[in-house]
Amino acid sequence: MAASHTSLTRLTDKKCVPCNLKELRPMSEDSAQTLMPQVAEWNLVNDGGVMKLKRSWTARTFSKGLDFLRIVSVLAESEGHHPDLHLVGWNNVTIEIWTHAIGGLTENDFILAAKIDKLDVLDLIRRKPSD
C-alpha cells in the first residue's frame, strides 16, 4: 500500500489486512521512510534486496525473553501477521517484520510494529544495558 493511503490515521488504530497477492506490492523505500516516524524505535533494513523492519531488546532473563515473545505472538496471531521472532544468547530478543508473501514491506508491517511498541512489557525487558 502506498504511504498516502495511511493519511493521518495512527498505525495503532488500524488492523492488518489479508494479503491479496494479485494486488499487493512491496512499498518503496521512500514510502517506508514516510512511516518510520510512527515506529521510530525500529530500523529499516535492506536484507539482500528485501526491505524489513527490525528491532532488538535485551530481556531481563531468559524466561522473560520467552514471555515477551509469547506476548508478541498473541498480538501477531490476532492481527493475522507473523513476524520472525529470535531469542539469541540467553536474553537478546530481535523481531524482524516484513510481508513474506510478497518479499517486502507493506503497511501491515508498520501496523504490527506500532502495536508491538504499545505492548506493556517493561517488566520483561531492560530499559538500558546497565539495568
Image: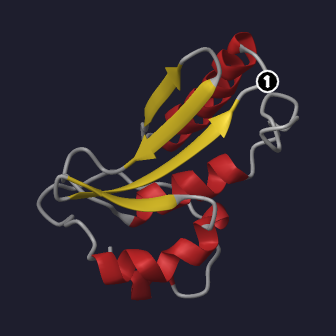
Residue under the image location 56 percent in, 28 percent down? 73
Q: State whether residue 2 appears in this view.
A: no
Task: Please give left or right for residue 121 compared with residue 81 in the image.
Answer: right
Q: Is residue 76 visible?
A: yes
Q: Position of residue 102 (x, y in %)?
A: 18, 53
x, y (%) of residue 48? 17, 52
Where residue 113 appears, as percent x and y from the top left, is 56, 53
Quarter-of-image position of residue 13: bottom right
**What residue appears at the point 51 percent right and 21 percent down from the top-left corner?**
88
Whether 10 is drawn above or below 85: the answer is below
Question: Is 2 situated above or below 105?
Answer: below
Mark 1 residue type: Arg
- Count the numbered circles shown: 1
Figure coloring: secondary structure
* Viewer-proximal residue among 106 and 128: 128
Q: Please indicate whether residue 80 sits to the left or right of residue 121 in the image.
A: left
In the displayed orientation, state which residue is furthest to the front: 130
Element under disc 1: loop
Is 55 located above or below residue 110 in the figure?
Answer: above
- Quarter containing the C terminus: top right
Seen as rendered, the residue at the extreme top is 63
Q: Is 116 located above or below residue 24 in the figure?
A: above
Occupied quadrant, residue 125: top right
| Residue found at x 72% / y 11% | 63
Q: Position of residue 61 (x, y in %)?
A: 76, 16
Circle 1 sits on which residue?
A: 60
Question: In the visual, does 31 lie left or right of 59?
Answer: left
- Quadrant hosting residue 89: top right
Name the residue at 53% across, 87% down: 7
Of the 4 image quadrants, the one containing the N terminus is bottom left
